[in-house]
Image: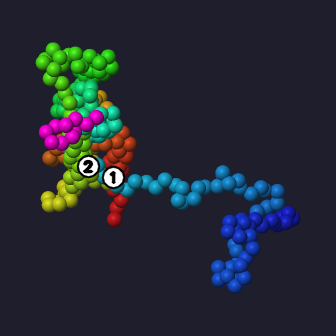
Amino acid sequence: MSNHPAEYFLPPNPSSTQPVPNDPATVNHPASVQARPAGVNPPRVEDQPPYESEVAKPVSELKIYSHSSLVYWWPVWAVGYLMAILTYSLGQQYQIAQDNEWFHGSSNLGVFYFLTLLLVILITNVSVRGLASGLVLLGVALVTVLLAYFGWWDEIFAWFGGLKIHLNFGAYLWFSTVMFLMWAISVFAVDRMSYWLIKPGQVTHEVVLGAGSKSYDTNGMMLEQNREDFFRHWLLGLGSGDIQIRTTGATKEQIDIPNVLLIGSKIKIMQRMIAEEPNAS
């Protein structure tokens, strides 16, 4: 037996240092203490393990949504709303038949809007890959901006009989609103009717209404990520991409999951969960 007296360390109560009389939480419930030899300093706060709530909990499942190409059409309604604001704030009213309509005096607004619509249609329907294709699109956008900056679009339109591009405030506002509603319904409702559920050792295609589900074993499964289209995946998709899954076994299948948003963070979770073994029930 050691002759060193034992010291006792009682952590302070964070709510109060004095017990409350007749409190059922303190009456007849002695506080537990821990004995430690003299001369041993109490553990520091930074050396203690984190609380349970601070520990990152592992992800048990992951839902992957495949979106339609309409998810990339957000610049159409965004630029349309911007043109509507500029037309209303910087334009003036002109009488058309019996009504007064808001128009902007310059045709630059119409040119910018039609260029945005043209580029979105081109990017979402044609795969733009390679440096040459990207330089062509950037060159077209740069020339358009330069011509608008120097005010040369009106002179160019004068060569074609003065056929300028003008949209009134109502055209920008209504078309952008309808476009936004279609985009929101597609992204947040229709595209979520079917999704891929990733669990350790299993990949399942779930359909909310109707057809049910279909599961795939991840044993030997190959996972591939494609983000080759810079304009679609990075410029319009803000980090989207396509996922390709190849299964093994008697019936090999290739599963394509296009237009997955924030694919960078999701692909890492998928790789880890596919490699894990399912918990035995």
Q: Which SS class for mark 1? A: strand
* Amino acid type shown at disc 1: Leu
- Write down the residue under mark 2: 184
Q: Does the magenta stretch mainly form a helix, a strand or a loop?
A: strand
| Residue extent of the magenta highlight | 92-101
- Estimate the x, y position of residue 128 in percent, counting from the top left: 22, 26
Which quarter of the rendered picture does the N terminus lie within?
Answer: bottom right
- Estimate the x, y position of residue 30 in percent, counting from the top left: 70, 78
- Write down the residue under mark 1: 62
Look at 29% across and 49% down and name the residue there. Answer: 64
Q: Residues within 10 Å of mark 1 (few under 14, many from 20)?
A: some
Look at 21% across and 44% down and name the residue there. Answer: 174
Q: Quadrant of residue 141?
A: top left
Q: Is residue 127 magenta?
A: no
Look at 37% across and 56% down and name the residue there. Answer: 60
* Amino acid type shown at disc 2: Ala
From the viewer's perspective, is the residue at label 1 or at label 2 nearer? 2
Residue nearer the viewer, 192 or 184? 184
Q: Can residue 80 be seen here?
A: no
Which quarter of the rendered picture does the C terminus lie within?
Answer: bottom left
Look at 78% across and 56% down and name the residue there. Answer: 40
Position of 207 relative to 8 (above/below): above
Residue nearer the viewer, 95 or 174? 95
Q: Can residue 30 be seen here?
A: yes
Residue nearer the viewer, 64 or 143? 143
Q: Tell how many labels.
A: 2
Q: Earlier in the sequence, mark 1 or mark 2?
A: 1
Q: Which SS class for mark 2? A: helix
- Estimate the x, y position of residue 228 in percent, counting from the top left: 27, 29
